[in-house]
Amino acid sequence: MIQTKRIKLIAILVAIISLGACKKDADVEEVSSGSNPGTTLEEPDLTHLPFGGESPNNILIQNEGDPQPDFLSLWLCGLPANGAGNSNAADWTNPDGSWNYDLKPQVEGNMLWPHELEIYLDGNGNRIISGNGLPDHPTGIFPVTPGSAAYQYDGNPNVISPQNVQYVFDAMPVEASQPSCVPFGPSGISLTGCAIYHGSSTLGNDAAAHEMLDRFGGHTDGTERYHYHYPSDDLMDHIQPHNTGHSPLTGYMLDGFGIYGPYGENGELLTSADLDECHGHKHPVMWDGEMVDIYHYHWTYDFPYNIGCFKGNP
């Protein structure tokens, strides 16, 4: 019988705080070790990133004639009719057509929230996740502050509100016979308690390259749900500081498979070219306290960032 384990995180504060106040409780972190933990980690070049939606990093849309996923791409089920957001990335686009993360404005501010999250195995083969969808770290100020650098590109008018987070995943998910397309809305749940969204905006462009995000790679939308599009250093370090070897677990996608940070088995920096069409691969990783040979996703610094399609059944 699988022993029940519980993770309970509660932090209550609504205020603007200094950047140094952000620290995650080590009790909720799950570490994954690589085969060569002494490897020095390679730093990513965030000044030259490929735009998603431009070949070979395509945005494929099932209901517009794309019947299957493809390597380096995001396979969407469809696009909403009422898309919104920023479509102008010219000010941080390089002459070679790539984009520069360091030049792109961020949503400023350091708001903390009344965070709740519980994750446990129920002893019957299920992983239970519940919470209020609010992060355990500071966010930018939403709606975006008029006059700020981010506001001139996207005056996102939406607030951040609590959500009813209730998921039941297989504790040991299995790969489906065929991959599934990815809808809009949550694609997964982070260990911070917030939603993980795929790499496209509702306009059908590269969300991380166009939309105004805070320093944790997140923002809110018309559902008032705070969510992530990008694995910023602040987000990855907050979930668990990582210096050597394989990245730790950072959350779960909606098919139950884990999503890990951007470093692979020997501490090598992964790109989308190192992963399959769903943006993952299979090898032994730390899973519920044991090394298990299981499929898993990775965050990467290049599009599609976190998922290309669902490998299991969402």
Image (tube, helix red, strand yellow):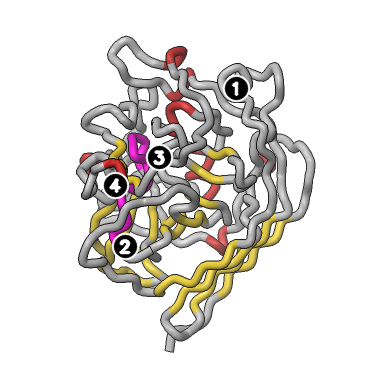
What x and y, as percent, mark residue 40?
32, 40
Tell me what residue is drawn at x 70 percent, y 25 percent: 145
Question: Nearer the viewer's eye, disc 4 or disc 1?
Answer: 4
Which residue is nearer to you in this view: 300 or 163? 163
Which residues fall within the magenta stretch?
300-312
Circle 4 sits on which residue?
62
Which numbered disc, 4 or 2, marks the residue that appears first in the sequence? Answer: 4
Q: Residue furthest bottom?
A: 1
Tell me what residue is drawn at x 58 percent, y 33 percent: 214
Circle 3 sits on which residue?
199
Relative height, residue 290 to residue 194 (above, below): below
Which residue is nearer to you in this view: 211 or 31? 211
Q: Indicate the secondary structure of the residue bearing disc 3.
A: loop
Amino acid type of disc 2? Val
Amino acid type of disc 1? Ala
What x and y, as percent, mark residue 140?
65, 34
Label 1 to label 3, Cα distance in Å?
19 Å
